[in-house]
Amino acid sequence: MRSAVGEQGAYEVDDDPARVDRDTVWEFLSTGAYWSTWRERAHLERQLDISWRVAGAYRTADGALVGFARAISDGLSMAYLADVFVLPSARGHGLGKELVRLMVEQGDGAAFKWMLHTADAHGLYAQFGFAAPDEMYMERPGKAAALGRSAG
């Protein structure tokens, strides 16, 4: 799925995994993402390879990746949204919102139960129905969290 975003279609979002610039994703996640700096490049490559869906936001003029999101899922009923980001140079154009919309409201996952972890952007995710978990939700933190690192 591909859609134009921003002023005069200056950007587009697309869920074609072949388009994702893995170097740009690695650069941001390894240096600019509070939830991800613990990962090694091999971890990211594996995560990208086995993700249920990935999406990118691209500058229309040159096709450069400026935003990203990925999901893991059982493919039937639930999914976990992870690694959502927009590069600082492209923020303010609604790209984060369009990435989340593409991931959770369009395609096969539109009827899924979605989960995520975040320390910020709660307002963005609330627009798509994300809320604090109810009393039935439990979580066992991963080893990265136990070591003081976020495993988002």
Image (tube, rainbow, N blue to C red):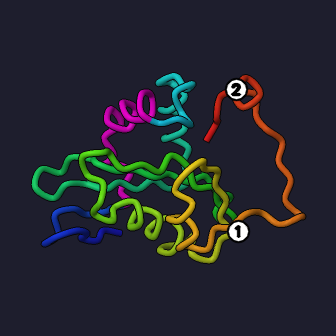
- Magenta: main secondary structure equals helix
* Residue at image point 47% right, 74% down: 106
Q: Nearer the viewer, residue 91 or 151?
A: 91
x and y, in percent, of residue 135 in the image: 89, 64
- Could you say which disc has been placed on residue 77 in the image? 1
Residue bounds of the magenta highlight:
15-32
Task: Look at label 2 and name its amino acid.
Answer: Gly
* Residue at image point 16% right, 70% down: 7
Q: To which quarter of the image does residue 56 belong?
A: bottom left
Q: Nearer the viewer, residue 44 or 148?
A: 148
Image quadrant holding the C terminus, namely top right
- Could you say which disc has been placed on residue 56 in the image? none
x and y, in percent, of residue 23 in the image: 32, 32
| Gap in angstroms between the C-alphas marked 1 and 2 | 31 Å
Magenta-span inclusion, residue 91? no
- Count of numbered marks: 2
Q: Earlier in the sequence, mark 1 or mark 2?
A: 1
Image quadrant holding the N terminus, namely bottom left
Q: To which quarter of the image does residue 94 belong?
A: bottom left
